[in-house]
Image (cartoon, rainbow, N blue to C red):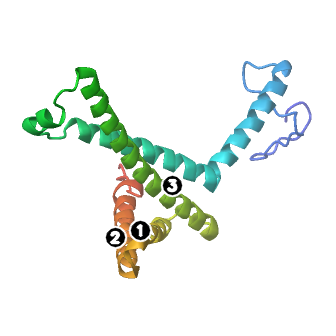
């Protein structure tokens, strides 16, 4: 018994809103700032859970990765020195550099746009399916892979759309099983 009031084991203390205990090192003057920070953390969490934010982030990341891959592949591109001499004859060094950089920029834009489209499409469809099913399992990524693959191959006809969907679904399942849902070995 503490101070005459009964003490119950496993009893959870209940505090009035705004009267919760403060973290160590904070005073009552800090309470308003802490509550404001908690409020904005909640807004940020809600935004990050939205399908629109996930789609935009996946599209941006896909664009960045695609541009980076294109930049790396452009630096390893094989060029025939004789052909280069013929096409760049009479050009100054700055003109040659500008042409090379312009070519690299075009390739980065094209590749980044393609990767961004795939990332945004897959993430958006997966988020909508996950929201609808209210589950987070492998079936979401496989179904979204199928739909995304079908959408990406739709211009080549129905057979290609189904084939693209099946291929993307298989790829999504493999990535999900190998990297995302891998069970960690139990330590004894």
Q: Residue at x 62, y 53 (%)?
A: 52
Q: Give yes or no for contact between labels 2 and 3 (Cβ–Cβ under 8 Å).
A: no
User: What is the number of the mark on residue 120?
Assistant: 3
Choose between 94 and 12: the one closer to the eye: 94
Q: Is residue 126 above or below residue 9?
A: below
- Relative to 152, 80 lies left or right: left
Q: Residue at x 61, y 49 (%)?
A: 53
Query: Is 68 displayed left or right of 80 in the figure?
Result: right
Residue that protrudes farthest toward the right in the picture = 4
Q: Which residue is mark 2?
A: 167
Residue visible at 36% across and 37% down in the picture: 105
Residue 185: image x %, image y %? 34, 53
Q: Is disc 2 placed on a helix, strand or loop? A: helix
In the picture, measured across the screen, residue 80 lies left or right of residue 123, that is: left
Please determine whether, in this image, residue 66 is positioned above or below residue 174. Answer: above
Which structural element holds mark 1? helix
Tell which of 16 and 142 is nearer to you. Answer: 142
Please report contact status of discs 2 and 1: CB closer than 8 Å, yes or no. yes
Question: Which numbered circle lies on residue 149?
Answer: 1
Asked whether disc 3 touches disc 1, contact meaning CB atoms under 8 Å apart, the reply is no
Mark found first going from the N terminus, 2 or 3: 3
Alpha carbons under labels 2 and 1: distance apart: 7 Å
In which quarter of the view is residue 77 placed?
top left
- Label 1 Cα neighbours within 10 Å, binned few <14 / some 14-19 / many ≥20: many
């Amino acid at each position: 018994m503490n101070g005459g009031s009964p003490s119950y084991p496993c009893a959870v203390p209940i505090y009035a809103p705004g009267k919760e205990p403060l973290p160590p090192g904070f005073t009552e003057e800090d309470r308003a700032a802490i509550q404001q920070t908690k409020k904005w953390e909640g807004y940020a969490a809600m935004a990050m859970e939205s399908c629109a934010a996930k789609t935009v982030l996946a599209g941006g990341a896909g664009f960045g990765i695609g541009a980076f891959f294109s930049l790396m592949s452009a630096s390893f591109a094989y060029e025939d020195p004789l052909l280069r001499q013929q096409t760049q004859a009479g050009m100054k060094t700055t003109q040659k550099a500008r042409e090379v950089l312009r070519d690299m920029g075009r390739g980065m834009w094209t590749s980044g746009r393609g990767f961004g489209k795939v990332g945004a499409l897959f993430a958006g469809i997966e988020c909508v399916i996950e929201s609808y099913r209210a589950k987070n399992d492998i079936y979401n990524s496989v179904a979204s892979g199928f739909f995304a693959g079908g959408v990406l191959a739709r211009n080549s006809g129905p057979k290609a759309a189904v084939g693209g969907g099946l291929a993307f679904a298989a790829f999504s399942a493999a990535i999900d099983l190998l990297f995302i849902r891998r069970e960690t070995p139990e330590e004894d």
